[in-house]
Amino acid sequence: MITIPNGYAPMLLQAVRDAALYHEGLMHSETIRDEERADYEEYHVLLTQFLAFLKGEYARDEAEIGVPLERLRV
């Protein structure tokens, strides 16, 4: 079990969100080859699932963390 300090939790959510947005844009670009596209798509799905999981965990501890989830815009 990994324990993330409360001060890092907002940054973790935003970093995963940024990674998901980056990979979504990358999949729509012409910089990846067709034979690589499936790997990028799978990774994007994993990122979005991870973000959803983190948001649930964050919401559970939101009062303790002190920054409302809606302020993070994730």
Image (spheres, rainbow, N blue to C red):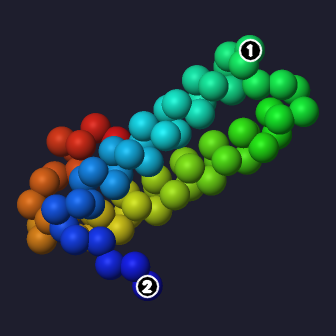
* Left or right position of 69 against 46: left
Task: Identify which residue is drawn at 22% across, 71% down.
Answer: 5
> Badge 1, how many Cα within 10 Å: few under 14, some, many 20+?
few
Q: Is residue 48 above or below residue 25?
A: below
C-alpha separation, residue under disc 1 versus residue under disc 2 = 39 Å
Q: Closer to the camera, 58 or 35?
A: 35
Q: Is residue 29 above or below residue 45?
A: above
Task: Identify which residue is drawn at 56% across, 55% down.
Answer: 49
> Badge 2, how many Cα within 10 Å: few under 14, some, many 20+?
few
Label whose residue precedes the other's in the sequence (1 or 2): 2
1 and 2 marks in contact (CB < 8 Å): no
The tag on residue 10 is none
Residue 50: give x, y in percent of width and height.
Answer: 52, 58
**Quadrant where the image shows the C terminus:** top left
Secondary structure type for disc 1? loop
Q: Is residue 65 above or below residue 36?
A: below
Q: Closer to the camera, 46 or 4?
A: 4
The tag on residue 30 is 1
The amino acid pointed to by label 2 is Met
- Please give the residue where the numbered disc 2 appears in the rendered image: 1
The residue at the far bottom in this view is 1
Task: Identify which residue is drawn at 29% across, 71% down.
Answer: 4
Q: Closer to the camera, 20 or 53?
A: 20
Residue 42: give x, y in percent of width and height.
Answer: 73, 47
* Left or right position of 43 against 54: right
Residue 28 occupies which quadrant of the picture? top right
Q: Closer to the camera, 43 or 71?
A: 43
Residue 70: give x, y in percent of width and height.
Answer: 22, 44
Residue 31: give x, y in percent of width and height.
Answer: 72, 19
**Quadrant where the image shows the N terminus:** bottom left
Secondary structure type for disc 2? loop
